[in-house]
């Protein structure tokens, strides 16, 4: 049944993308007729608007010497109504900084109120898509580590020591993306999440998942984004407090809005977490039951180190 749901989502998603591609075909063909033919091979840019697709990472890096200040905010469940003022109570906020060490290496740190989590990551470009099908896709590797700052997990007996190493989790992810045209981009994200400590006997320390995401531009400054992670059976974590049940697959739908050096993302998701550790392996809310969180991401980039040969602004993202 869960596999059928995944196939249904994938079918609907790709049908939506194909419809968008068809709508663009006429204008693309006209552009090809008007443009002068060229054999020059260039790197493809602007696959996505920012370094985050929605909750997870996109194929993009910030450029060398550029600092990206990010605020990720997720409200509580909308279904709580006036009791929690439609999710205003119990919100989760992450504040982070990403920095481009080189044009192929980006690092980042952040702190989230969700389990008082601290996280850090490095994202490395391996391959870059080029025009003319010289290289059809872009490939990046993401390595991340996070540590929980909470005093003691509620499901762990007080008699069991909670050491620093128990607080750690690690993420390995391969990001494979392709920009099909100026309007449509897709990416797939095979992911491994390792937890040093789990809550139950028989629960796997390793979650294996595959993410699927895409962007369809609605205008020069707005785009629709979709992100979904499927966890493979046998690796899912148990749902906290409910023995015999497992966590849910996170689905996020949102809107990108770009204004100068800012990028706003308005999102609806069944995950309140924003890190791969908690978002992929610990989502307990269910879209089918109306368990939806509204949230937003705000990104502002600053040039810290300006190359000598560069005299213009580097704050353009699209």
Image (tube, rainbow, N blue to C red):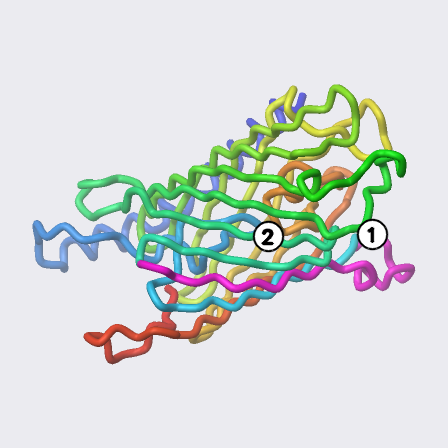
Indicate the quadrant where residue 221 lies. Answer: bottom left
Please say if 132 is above or below 208: below
Residue 26: in magenta span: no
Residue extending farthest bottom: 311
Q: Residue at x 52, y 67 (%)?
A: 299
| Label 1 sits on residue | 79
Residue 84: in magenta span: yes
Mark 1 vs mark 2: give the one in front.
2
Residue 284 seen? yes
Element at badge 2? strand
Q: Is residue 299 found left or right of 2 in the rendered image?
A: left
Q: Residue 250: give x, y in percent of width and height.
A: 64, 40
Q: Residue at x 28, y 46 (%)?
A: 128
Q: Residue at x 20, y 48 (%)?
A: 131
Give the residues in magenta.
78-102
Q: Residue 233: give x, y in percent of width and height.
A: 64, 21
Cα gap from disc 1 to disc 2, whole angstroms: 30 Å
Q: Which mark is residue 119?
A: 2
Q: Is residue 2 found left or right of 188 in the rendered image?
A: right
């Amino acid at each position: 049944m869960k596999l059928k749901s995944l196939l249904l989502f994938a079918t609907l998603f790709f049908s939506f993308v194909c419809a968008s591609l068809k709508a663009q075909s006429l204008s693309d063909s006209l552009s090809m007729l008007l443009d002068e033919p060229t054999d020059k091979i260039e790197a493809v840019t602007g696959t996505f608007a920012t370094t985050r697709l929605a909750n997870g990472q996109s194929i993009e890096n910030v450029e060398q010497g550029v600092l990206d200040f990010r605020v990720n905010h997720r409200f509580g469940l909308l279904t709580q109504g006036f009791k929690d003022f439609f999710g205003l109570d119990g919100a989760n906020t992450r504040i982070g900084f990403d920095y481009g060490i080189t044009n192929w290496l980006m690092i980042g740190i952040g702190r989230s109120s969700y389990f008082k989590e601290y996280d850090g990551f490095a994202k490395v470009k391996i391959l870059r898509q080029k025009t003319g099908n010289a290289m059809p896709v872009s490939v990046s590797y993401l390595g991340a580590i996070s540590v929980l700052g909470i005093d003691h997990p509620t499901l762990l007996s007080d008699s069991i020591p909670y050491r620093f190493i128990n607080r750690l989790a690690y993420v390995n992810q391969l990001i494979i993306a392709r920009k099909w045209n100026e309007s449509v981009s897709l990416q797939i994200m095979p992911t491994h999440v390792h937890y040093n400590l789990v809550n139950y006997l028989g629960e796997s320390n390793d979650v294996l998942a595959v993410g699927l995401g895409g962007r369809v531009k609605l205008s020069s400054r707005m785009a629709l984004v979709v992100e979904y992670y499927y966890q493979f059976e046998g690796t899912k974590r148990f749902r906290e407090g409910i023995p015999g049940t497992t966590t849910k697959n996170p689905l996020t739908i949102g809107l990108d809005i770009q204004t100068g050096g800012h990028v706003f993302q308005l999102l609806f998701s069944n995950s309140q977490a924003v890190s791969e550790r908690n978002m992929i392996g610990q989502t307990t809310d269910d879209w089918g039951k109306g368990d939806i969180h509204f949230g937003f991401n705000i990104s502002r980039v600053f040039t810290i180190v300006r190359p000598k040969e560069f005299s213009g602004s580097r704050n353009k993202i699209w």
